Every structure is written in structure tokens, then in C-alpha cells.
Image (cartoon, helix red, strand yellow):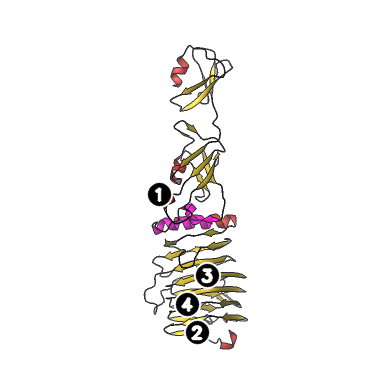
């Protein structure tokens, strides 16, 4: 122990390694006059010599949980994590690596001594705040990196989505989802490069208690692909005010999207050259609402773009094209290509409030 060394009358040779049990670290005898700082250099009280803590080399540490990583101080047992230590983490939470979900939040991390970064996606602060573990990125961001998981509580997925959206927005990146994640709040795609799953029927989001909420506010040019976007409307003859995808921005695209069980599946407005294909919309009060009014800045827009290779199926109203109150709508060059309207109980396609069929 430190006390044992200080009290020892033995003159150890310079360079000898001495292990201090209470520090759980190795020290080496150094030349000098017996001075120390009480932490990394320990001076003897009996002889004219000191010992200096051996700085640990970068080591590889394997553990099963990212929560262990956050609690992993720079010392544990005989292991000392040095700046630049490489750590292999199996998964975000215990047991995830054994699932068939795919990416589970694990990966390779580097310990950065003194870092205070803690975004909950790529950087995780240690419990003793001595540094952060930084993920070595090898692919696009996955929702599981922040704890998103198909069998999580919806509020845990809310936290994961918020963290990933904030990280991707700040770093101009996109993210992927694997499986259908239950959430209670939607998100905005501002400054996100893309949001993607692997298959539109198996990967995406279910918005719980969706009445009056919007799942995705598609505000900026973000590519959406291979996603399921699902609400929980029960009676499609009544519009509960929920929206699956809102706004549809400028010069962008979406492919292989399934939207179901919302008051409005897609509210498509204020768009220029927005193209969606291989869309399936069903079980909604209104499958697609097309208008040219922007509720944020209260002005008119020309809505242009196209919907192709799609199916509008089993809604109350399939597609409604119309003016928004006192605001006019100009649909110039908006086209439907190879799109099926089927089993919509009230109407398939309606042009209302002064919008003529020739405008679409």
C-alpha cells in the first residue's frame, strides 16, 4: 500500500516496478531526492527515493453494456484507461447482441481524457467525468446507438429519437432504423440528410396516442426511404387531427413509404418539385391532403411535383386537392403516374374549393 511504501526502509533500485494495492496501479522507482505530489509520484518517508505511477498504454476493454461504459471510471481493478484507449462495446444494453435486430448500439470506442462531450449517440461521458468515450463511426448513424429499440418503452425511444435527431441535425448526417419503434412524440427533419429503414413494412415508427400530433415534419430537403409511418386512429371516418408526414419540402424525394392510420396520412403543401414514389397510404381519414398554404408564414405557394407507382387504399377520402380557406392554390405541373385509388370509402380523388380538375 502507499503507507507500506512510505514506511519502508528498503532502497529499491531505480526502474523497479512496485504495485500499490490501494491504488490498484503499478509504480516505478525513479531517481530523485525523495519528493512527490501524493498522487502520481509518491515519496518515501524513510529513504531518499520516490516512485512514479506507470502510465497505462492504450488497452482494449470488452464489456456488454454502454451503461457500463458511462460508469467506467479511468480506473477499475488493475486496469487504467489512458488517453486513446480503445474499448469494444458489445451493445447498448445487456443482451441486445443476441437479438436479430441487426445494429444494436455496440461498436468500437476511443477514450478521450478530459473530453466533456456527451451527446448520447457518439460521445458518452464517464461517470467520474474524467473523459468521454467517442464512437468510431463505420456507417450511417443507427437509432440503436442512442438506445432506440423495438421492444423498448415508447418514452425510451422518444429519448433516443430526440438524441439522434439533434446529433444528425448538428452534424448534417442521416440515420437508419431497424424494426418498428414505438414513440409518443414526432420529430422534425430540419438539417437531417436522410431517414431510412430497410423495408417499408418492417422498419419505422408507430406514434402512440397520435391524436393531434404529427409524426414527421418534413421541413427541409431530407430523403425518406423504406419507412413505415403509423398512427393509431381507430375510426377513419373521423379526423383526429393527427398527421403522418407534414409539409413535403423543396426539391426532394421519398421512396418506398407506407403511411397508415392517421387523420391525414400526408399533408402535402408548400412544395416545389417534390416527388414521392412507391407510396402506400391506407386506413386514414384523408390519405393525402394537397394544398398550397403554409400555415407558418401564412402565404400562398405553387405546389409542384409528382406521385408515382403508388396506391391510395382503404382510406375515408383518398386524395383531397383544395384551397385552404381564403388562400389560393396553384397546382402547376403536379402529376399522378401509375397510381391506384382503391376501396376509399367516401371519395377517391376530390378537387374542391375552386380547384378545377385541369389544375392537377
- Residue 344 % position (x, y): 44, 82
Distance in Å between CA atoms under marks 2 and 1? 49 Å
- State which tag comes first along the sequence, 4 or 2: 4
Q: Which mark is residue 131?
A: none
Viewer-nearest of labels 3 and 2?
3
Mark 1 surroundings: few (<14), some (14-19) or many (≥20) residues within 10 A: few
Q: Position of residue 110 (x, y in %)?
A: 55, 42
| Number of other residues with Cα within 10 Å of mark 4, as a class: few under 14, some 14 to 19, many 20 or more | many
Which of 187 and 109 lies nearest the eye of the viewer? 109
> Which mark, by number, is residue 95?
1
Distance CA(mark 4)–CA(mark 2):
10 Å
- Classify 265 as above or below 127: below
Q: Which residues are magenta?
A: 137-166
Identify the residue under disc 4: 287
Q: Are marks 1 and 3 in contact (CB under 8 Å)?
A: no
Crowd around label 3: few <14 · some 14–19 · many ≥20 (10 Å)? many
Report, in whole angstroms, how far the alpha carbon at label 4 lies from the one at label 3.
16 Å
Element type at marker 3?
strand
Residue 71 position within the rendered picture, expressed as x and y whole percent measured from the top left: 44, 41
Residue 165 belongs to magenta span:
yes
**Vertical order, 106 against 52 (above or below):** below
Mark 2 or 1: in front is 1
Q: Which residue is mark 3?
A: 256
Q: Nearer the viewer, mark 1 or mark 4?
A: 1
Q: Residue furthest left?
A: 234
- Judge depth for marks 4 and 3 and give the one in front: 3
- Looking at the rendered structure, which numbered label has been put on residue 349? 2
Magenta segment includes 296: no
SS at badge 2: strand
Q: Position of residue 82 (x, y in %)?
A: 54, 35
Mark 3–mark 2 Cα distance, whole angstroms, equals 21 Å
Mark 4 secondary-structure assignment: strand
Amino acid at each position: 500500500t502507499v503507507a507500506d511504501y512510505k514506511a519502508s526502509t528498503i532502497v529499491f533500485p531505480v526502474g523497479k516496478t512496485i504495485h500499490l494495492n490501494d491504488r490498484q496501479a503499478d509504480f516505478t522507482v525513479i531517481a530523485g531526492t525523495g519528493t512527490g505530489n501524493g498522487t502520481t509520484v509518491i515519496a518515501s518517508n524513510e529513504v531518499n527515493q520516490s516512485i512514479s505511477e506507470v502510465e497505462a498504454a492504450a488497452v482494449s476493454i470488452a464489456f456488454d453494456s454502454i451503461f457500463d461504459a458511462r460508469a467506467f471510471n479511468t480506473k477499475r481493478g488493475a486496469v487504467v484507461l489512458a488517453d486513446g484507449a480503445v474499448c469494444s462495446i458489445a451493445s447498448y444494453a445487456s443482451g441486445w447482441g443476441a437479438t436479430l435486430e441487426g445494429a444494436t448500439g455496440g461498436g468500437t470506442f476511443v477514450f478521450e481524457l478530459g473530453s466533456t462531450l456527451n451527446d448520447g449517440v457518439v460521445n458518452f461521458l464517464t461517470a467520474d467525468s474524467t473523459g468521454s468515450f467517442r464512437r468510431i463511426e463505420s456507417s450511417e448513424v443507427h437509432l440503436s446507438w442512442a438506445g432506440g429499440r423495438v421492444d423498448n418503452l415508447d418514452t425510451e425511444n422518444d429519448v433516443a429519437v430526440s438524441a439522434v435527431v439533434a446529433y444528425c441535425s448538428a452534424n448534417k448526417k442521416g440515420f437508419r432504423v431497424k424494426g418498428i419503434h414505438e414513440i409518443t412524440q414526432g420529430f422534425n427533419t430540419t438539417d437531417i440528410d436522410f431517414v431510412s429503414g430497410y423495408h417499408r413494412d418492417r422498419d419505422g415508427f408507430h406514434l402512440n396516442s397520435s391524436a393531434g400530433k404529427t409524426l414527421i415534419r418534413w421541413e427541409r430537403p431530407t430523403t425518406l426511404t423504406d419507412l413505415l409511418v403509423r398512427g393509431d386512429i381507430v375510426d377513419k371516418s373521423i379526423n383526429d387531427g393527427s398527421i403522418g408526414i407534414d409539409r413535403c419540402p423543396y426539391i426532394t424525394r421519398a421512396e418506398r413509404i407506407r403511411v397508415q392510420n392517421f387523420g391525414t396520412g400526408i399533408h402535402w403543401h408548400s412544395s416545389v418539385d417534390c416527388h414521392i414514389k412507391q407510396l402506400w397510404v391506407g386506413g386514414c381519414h384523408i390519405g393525402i391532403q394537397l394544398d398550397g398554404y403554409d400555415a407558418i408564414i401564412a402565404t400562398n405557394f405553387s405546389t409542384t411535383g409528382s406521385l408515382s407507382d403508388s396506391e391510395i387504399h382503404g382510406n375515408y377520402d383518398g386524395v383531397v386537392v383544395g384551397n385552404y380557406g381564403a388562400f389560393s392554390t396553384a397546382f402547376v405541373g403536379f402529376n399522378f403516374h401509375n397510381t391506384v385509388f382503391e376501396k376509399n370509402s367516401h371519395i377517391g380523388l376530390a378537387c374542391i374549393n375552386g380547384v378545377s380538375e385541369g389544375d392537377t
